[in-house]
Image: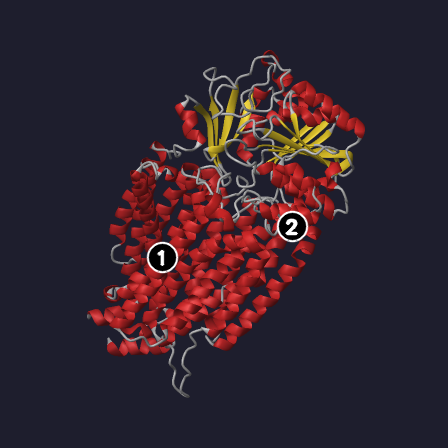
């Protein structure tokens, strides 16, 4: 058969318009896109989890940027490279799919055996080269994966609805399975699965080279399996896990999950509990032990989450005097204030709070821990280390998010306690850009106060920073949250309802421990007198006490009237404003306007690292957009005059990339509280959006690609988004007491119309461009993928300033802008069918005639 005829039958672009939509190539292309899309999603999640452990959660944007820029680069390269158009579609897609698998295997091996610590770049130039190598090896798999999609859309633009449906459906199914896969396989084996699935996609599409691709893929799978079973990822030297290993800590428990990698380190008798402040902050040297305790420090273990964010397990045996220690610790202060208390514990951690509660003689404990593997360590696998404290009949422990659990509870507690439960580590993916906790917002504090029994107290304990780090961060901000909440509840003088106790004054120690106690009623004179006695006995100090003027930043904010407090907040170079559920960024301490003047760059999130990384990610995305959209578009325009305006193509698809990510991230945040677990929110939201966006894409197959239809879609999207904006809180509170399956079902139902509409915009645009200028389809893909990176990073930056509701409104404005730049196809002449692909019967007749 002549090569020209062969290209016609296999979908070659010599005569793209003659390739039948229902032919054999399309029947294999759609399943291949389904598989490759699933690979892409699983690869993103797997690498995000790996980097949260090996580098830091700050750098999760590397994966997002690599994925979307890889997709954008694929469109740009294919726009400039025409030789691939002569290759049969099955062979080309098979080659790209197998390249995806091989590149994934190479990336797995590289990041396993080449450790990276970005915070040492200033001291070691080789770390900069390693960072560049990371960007390259993780971008290449996404480049090949993106190429499979854009090749299919370029060859079959009229079938964009079906093909985009397959693409989104693959991502949706992967999203639905990712939590189960991560919990059962872990990221190393999950990446092996990505290599295997890429090989499957190559074999599906290729009819001529199946054996060759199966052999190459089999070798790549074997290499990745060996790497997964023999090697392990290495945490950066700046992470605590690296320090534990250097100090001789032995890992006696290790497990990955969709939340964390959880490691239990045992030090034996090598290091006393209080000897090394770099390992723990609970001892005499820097922590909250009162001066009246004269016993020996007990042995301890440390639970590390993603190589850092550690929780301490102190051995609880009679000979260790552990309970006596905790009676004299800040952790036990609330139990001395409220003996026989019914306690809600919002973060069980390594069990030290449970032991402290037992030592304080509490009546009962309802404990919640975000990480299921930590619950397994404390209550099952190593519960004997804590004398099986979880098994007491008056103690109930569950895995979940503390805020959501207490909101659904009908109980009232004498003490609601949160100890060092970070909002950043509650991000289910470990990604600072995608998820923020809701434990320390104004609405959260109100929830805790609502669940107090008469004269009950909210107890929030954490380490803070002092000299030489500068002003404390945590304590003044949580103090402002408490004062603002009390004022919103109608309390005129919140100063009488708050007490803050610390192990040291901020100028005396670089890391004091602080405990803030908040009540619905004012603290009584007997309660304050009891506290005065305890502090004098143990050597603790007040950072705020009703009836006293103490010159700490926290006390100044609490004692100030609202207007004066705002003036003080404006004067501080740190951001002490009270976070809300719409702007829940409690750990975002640095004001953007003061970033260059006061910021420090350090591995810890107490510095301006989050701000700097976000800005670096935004700059990286913008430069990528210039290099992957603007430059290739100009080069292509010089080579061949465009049939459609490049500005309209870039404007429309760039708007979709930014606006879709704005809406996606805002909705993920919106559902965290309803679903009660960050993992559920991320998974359910993305699954629903992708699945129903796939449905919307499929439904557009017979919808004319006109500006009028885009207007109707934007109007519908505006109405639905407005409903979410106005009624979201009401629906959420109505559904909150319902069982989890019902809440998940309700969330999916709420996202059905939004997802369906969102999925219609891109295929309509692809068809409109393909009808006028098929050569511009790769440019459209590059614009959409590249600007999605900008949308991801920019949405979080904007949310820290105007909140997620503001981000949602901006997204709608961008969709309205997309109407005006929509690349509407030319009007068809009466009686002439100008579609890029004729009906199957016509195409078959033409092919038969030419044969």
* Camera-nearest label, 1 or 2: 1
Q: Earlier in the sequence, mark 1 or mark 2?
A: 1
Image coords of residue 698 (percent x, y): 48, 66
383 to the left or right of 254: right
Write down the residue under mark 1. Answer: 624
Quadrant occupied by the N terminus: bottom left
Image coords of residue 785 (percent x, y): 40, 59
Between 311 and 369, the one nearer to me in the picture:
311
Between 675 and 619, the one nearer to me in the picture:
619
Image coords of residue 160 (percent x, y): 41, 67
Residue 251 at least partly seen: yes
| 287 relative to 705, above or below | above
- Count of marks overlaid on the render: 2
663 to the left or right of 89: right
Q: Residue at x 48, y 70 (%)?
A: 818
Q: Which mark is residue 742?
A: 2
Image coords of residue 446 (percent x, y): 70, 44
714 to the left or right of 144: right
Q: Residues within 10 Å of mark 1 (few under 14, many from 20)?
A: many
């Amino acid at each position: 058969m002549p090569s020209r005829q062969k290209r016609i039958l296999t979908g070659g672009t010599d005569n793209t318009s003659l390739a039948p939509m229902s032919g054999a190539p399309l029947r294999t292309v759609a399943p291949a896109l389904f598989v490759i899309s699933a690979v892409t999603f699983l690869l993103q999640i797997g690498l995000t989890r790996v980097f949260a452990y090996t580098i830091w959660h700050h750098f999760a944007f590397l994966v997002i940027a690599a994925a979307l820029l890889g997709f954008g680069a694929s469109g740009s390269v294919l726009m400039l490279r025409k030789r691939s158009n002569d290759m049969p579609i099955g062979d080309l897609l098979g080659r790209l799919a197998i390249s995806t698998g091989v590149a994934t295997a190479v990336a797995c091996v590289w990041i396993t055996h080449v450790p990276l610590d970005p915070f040492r770049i200033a001291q070691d130039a080789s770390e900069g080269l390693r960072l560049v190598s990371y960007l390259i090896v993780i971008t290449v798999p996404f480049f090949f994966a993106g190429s499979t999609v854009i090749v299919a859309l370029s060859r079959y633009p009229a079938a964009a609805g079906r093909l985009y449906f397959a693409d989104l459906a693959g991502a949706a199914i992967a999203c639905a399975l990712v939590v189960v896969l991560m919990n059962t396989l872990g990221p190393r084996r999950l990446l092996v699965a990505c290599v295997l699935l890429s090989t499957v996609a190559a074999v599906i599409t290729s009819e001529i080279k199946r054996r060759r691709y199966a052999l190459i893929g089999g070798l790549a799978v074997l290499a990745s399996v060996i790497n997964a079973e023999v090697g392990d990822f290495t945490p950066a030297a700046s992470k605590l896990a690296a320090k534990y290993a250097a100090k001789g800590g032995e890992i006696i428990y290790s497990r990955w999950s969709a939340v964390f990698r959880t490691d239990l380190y045992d030090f034996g008798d090598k290091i006393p509990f209080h000897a090394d402040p770099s390992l723990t902050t609970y001892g005499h040297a820097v922590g909250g032990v009162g001066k009246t305790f004269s016993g020996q420090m007990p042995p301890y273990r440390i639970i590390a989450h993603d190589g850092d964010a550690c929780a301490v397990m102190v051995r609880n045996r009679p000979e260790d005097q552990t309970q006596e220690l905790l009676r004299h610790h800040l952790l036990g202060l609330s139990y001395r204030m409220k003996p026989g208390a019914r306690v809600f514990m919002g973060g069980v951690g390594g069990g030290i709070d449970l032991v402290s509660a037992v030592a304080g003689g509490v009546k009962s404990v309802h404990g919640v821990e975000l990480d299921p593997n930590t619950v397994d360590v404390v209550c099952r696998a190593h519960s004997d280390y804590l004398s099986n404290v979880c098994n007491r009949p008056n103690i109930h422990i569950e895995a979940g998010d503390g805020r959501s659990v207490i909101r659904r509870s009908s109980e009232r507690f004498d003490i609601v306690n949160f100890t060092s439960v970070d909002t950043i580590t509650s991000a289910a993916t470990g990604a600072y850009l995608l998820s923020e906790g809701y434990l320390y917002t104004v609405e959260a504090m109100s929830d805790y106060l609502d669940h107090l029994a008469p004269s009950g107290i909210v107890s929030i304990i954490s380490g803070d920073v002092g000299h030489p780090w500068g002003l404390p961060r945590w304590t003044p901000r949580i103090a402002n949250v408490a004062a603002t909440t009390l004022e919103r509840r109608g309390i005129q003088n919140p100063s009488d309802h708050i007490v803050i106790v610390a192990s040291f004054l901020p100028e005396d120690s670089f890391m004091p421990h602080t405990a803030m106690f908040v009540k619905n009623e004012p603290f009584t004179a007997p309660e304050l007198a009891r506290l005065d006695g305890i502090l004098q006995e143990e050597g603790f100090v007040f950072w705020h006490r009703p009836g006293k003027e103490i010159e700490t930043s926290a006390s100044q904010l609490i004692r100030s009237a609202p207007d004066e407090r705002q003036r003080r907040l404006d004067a501080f170079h740190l951001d002490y404003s009270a976070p809300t559920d719409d702007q829940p960024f409690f750990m975002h301490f640095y004001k953007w306007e003061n970033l260059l003047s006061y910021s420090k760059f350090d591995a810890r999130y107490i510095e301006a690292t989050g701000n700097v990384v976000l800005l670096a990610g935004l700059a990286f995305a913008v430069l990528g957009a210039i290099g992957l959209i603007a430059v290739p578009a100009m080069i292509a325009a010089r080579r061949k005059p465009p049939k459609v305006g490049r500005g309209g193509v870039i404007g429309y698809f760039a708007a979709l990339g930014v606006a879709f990510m704005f809406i996606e991230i805002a909705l993920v945040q919106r559902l965290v509280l309803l679903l009660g677990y960050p993992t559920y929110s991320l998974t359910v939201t993305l699954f629903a959006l992708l699945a129903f966006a796939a449905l919307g894409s499929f439904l557009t197959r017979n919808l004319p690609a006109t500006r009028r239809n885009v207007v109707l879609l934007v109007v519908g999207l505006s109405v639905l988004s407005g409903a979410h904006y106005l009624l979201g809180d009401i629906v959420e509170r109505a559904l909150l007491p319902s069982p989890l399956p019902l809440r998940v079902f309700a969330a999916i139902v709420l996202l059905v119309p939004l997802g369906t509409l969102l999925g219609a915009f891109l295929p309509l645009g692809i068809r409109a461009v393909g009808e006028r200028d098929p050569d511009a389809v790769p440019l459209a893909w590059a614009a959409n993928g590249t600007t999605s990176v900008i949308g991801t990073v920019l949405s979080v930056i904007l949310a820290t300033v105007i909140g997620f509701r503001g981000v949602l409104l901006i997204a709608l404005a961008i969709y309205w802008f997309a109407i005006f730049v929509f690349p509407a196809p030319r009007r068809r002449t009466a009686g002439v069918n100008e579609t890029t692909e004729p009906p199957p019967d016509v195409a078959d007749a033409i092919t038969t005639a030419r044969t």
